[in-house]
Amino acid sequence: MLKIGIISFLGVVQVCSAGAGDYHDDASMVQRTVQEDGLHTISDARLAALNKRAILFDHRKQKFFASMLSKVTHMLHFGGKKSVLAWLEKTTEEAKTTCAKGPGLGLVGFGMDMPNSISSLLGCKGNNTWDGLCLTKEILGGVLSPIMDLAMDIYNIEQDCGCPFLQGLKDCEEDTNQGYYLTPKEKNNFTTKVKTVSTIMAAYAGIYGAITTCQAKNGSKQAPMHPVALIPLPAAQASFSIYEFHKLRQFLIKEKAENKSTGDSDGTCEIVSGVSAIASDVGGFVTAVLDTVSHYKYDEKTKPNAGWEELCASEILGAIDAIPAMADVFCSWKSCEDGFPKGALRSFTYGTVEHSNGKCGDTEDEAPLPAADPTSTP
């Protein structure tokens, strides 16, 4: 078994380094030997000889491998240790915080919610037949809507994570309207359309879920993800929303006192968006708590109806959430169209330095790359 493991390892290594050896076709030296002589006929001496030809002991192959790595890092504009350190020096606190809070928590929440969503989807099958309305509700509200929301967060990642990554946050303000592939303002209409459809899907799922759950008066267990594990995330999101709303009010007062421009916005839509975020996140937290209470009350054999009131209230809150969610979608669109300095607000909220208006992709935003070594080519 040890010999088989060593040969397998050398096979992988030789495939990766075959371009620098004596064989330049698709089969490595180890593979050819195994094919020609058979796995169990290779002697220990022959295995030792093969081992010496591996990249771990062949300096020529090591040089070739290092050269290929160098070319890949040049292609990716990532010039080694100096480049990494220069990038780290330019990362900003606001970009790291909003990236973790936005796409980061969104991805974690998506991963934690999806197992229960899939379980609920599979629960729509009874007596070898699928309930069409249940399927529609679970697919639209439990699967498609979260995927669309997460996709839009990633699509507009320069607004949460900066461009270059974890550096200057970008927004629809004229001086910082830069992004990956398209600018935030160019993405605004498409993002709004997708989020509107996503919100309508979630609203339909919430209303249908509230009606069926409250009429059936049955409790249920939350599985496979335990509901207690789902409480901390909405609690953290609600805390962020409350803090950001407080800082938003301070920012608007500060900008007005200093006669600084907030684009064509007077701050009204930003206030509405902030209140909507608080309502949605606090509602999400309360929903998670109600689901947990219902989970502990329910027992399929002895108490099949226990916990239905909490479950019904949870579904109603989910349906009501469509109202602040739609308000947030509209106000986010208008805020972008008005050129509100969202990046400056986030710098004020989380940052330690003044917001930079440097353009995404400018050469000064990137660390200089070392000159390529012409002698490194094999």
Image (spheres, rainbow, N blue to C red):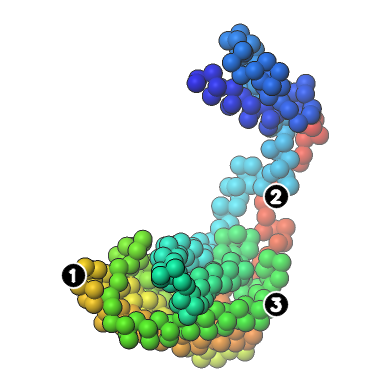
Cα gap from disc 1 to disc 2, whole angstroms: 63 Å
Where is the C terminus found, in terms of image quarters?
Answer: top right
What residue is shown with label 1?
302
Quadrant housing residue 172: bottom right
- Residue 269: % across, % down: 52, 89
Residue at coordinates 61% horizontally, 78% vertically from top-left? 194
Residue 186 numbered tag? 3
Q: Can residue 19 be seen in this view?
A: yes
Cα gap from disc 1 to disc 3, whole angstroms: 57 Å
Q: Which of marks 3 and 2 is nearer the N terminus?
A: 2
346 versus 223 height, above or below: below
- Residue 210: % across, % down: 37, 84
Q: Residues within 10 Å of mark 1 (few under 14, many from 20)?
A: few
Element under disc 1: loop
Are dots 3 and 2 in contact, CB under 8 Å? no
What residue is shown with label 2?
77
Residue type indicated by callout 1:
Thr
Residue type indicated by callout 2:
His
Element under disc 3: helix
373 versus 55 height, above or below: below
Q: Can residue 59 be seen in this view?
A: no
Residue at coordinates 79% horizontally, 29% vertically from top-left? 25
Q: Which of marks 1 and 2 is nearer the N terminus?
A: 2
